[in-house]
Amino acid sequence: MLVVNEALASHCGEARQMVWLADITAEARPMTVSGWTVPEASGNFCARGRFGAHSSNESFAPVYYRKLVFIAFFNAGVRVLDIRDPYRPVEAAYFIPAGNPVTNNVEVDERGYVYIVDRGGLGMHVLDLSGAARRIANRS
């Protein structure tokens, strides 16, 4: 199961909000097996405003299911995680819109397109994967 905490404060004025993967095989005893976040220093994100996890895609599109998840990370754009090994999620791709992004929502479709919406006025972007993320999705 994917759990996404939501960053509420700007400039990292709270504990880091992350993405967690949990094993819910025994529903009465869920167990966190890994966590992931964007390294803040990779973009000086704390100084730039609201930074941290916000939301994930909710589609079970077969092209990505059990392979890739997409996380909106406010000013760090959208992050694509390879979750084939849930104990070791790895970033496979990312996209940060030009300007002052506040990437709020992310969704995918059956064709493999990725849609992100910005709450700060940058609008919607329609993305297609490249590189490692595209290979993981078998969209060569």
Image: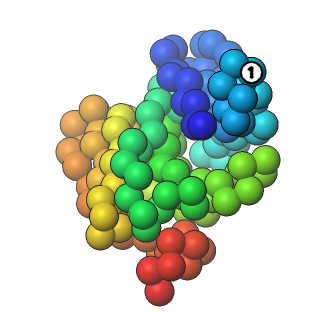
Please tell me which residue lies in front, 58 or 79.
Answer: 58
Residue 53: x %, y % from top left: 53, 32
Residue at the spot x=45%, y=40% of the render?
Answer: 56
Coloring applied to the structure: rainbow
* Mark 1 nearby-residue class (10 Å; few <14, some 14–19, many ≥20): few
Residue 61 seen in the current view: yes
Q: Name which quarter of the figure residue 126 lies in.
A: bottom left
User: As displayed, is residue 8 above or below residue 78?
Assistant: above
Q: Quadrant of the N terminus?
A: top right
Give the residue at mark 1. Answer: 29
Q: Which element type, helix, strand or loop, lies under badge 1?
A: loop
Q: Residue at x 55, y 78 (%)?
A: 135
Does residue 122 appear left or right of residue 133 in this picture?
Answer: left
Q: Which residue lies at the image location 44% right of the left edge and 80% below the top edge?
A: 139
Is 61 located above or below residue 43 in the figure? below
Is 122 located above or below residue 11 in the figure? below
Q: Nearer the viewer, residue 51 or 112?
A: 112
Left/right placement of residue 56 relative to residue 135 reads left
Q: How many marks?
A: 1
Residue 98 visible to an observer of this rendering: no
- Expressed as whole percent of the image width and height from the top left, the position of residue 24 reads 67, 32
Image quarter of residue 44: top right
Residue at x 56% of width, y 24% of height: 5
The three-letter amino acid code for the residue at tag 1 is: Arg
Horizontal arrangement in the rendering, residue 72 relative to residue 29 (left or right): left
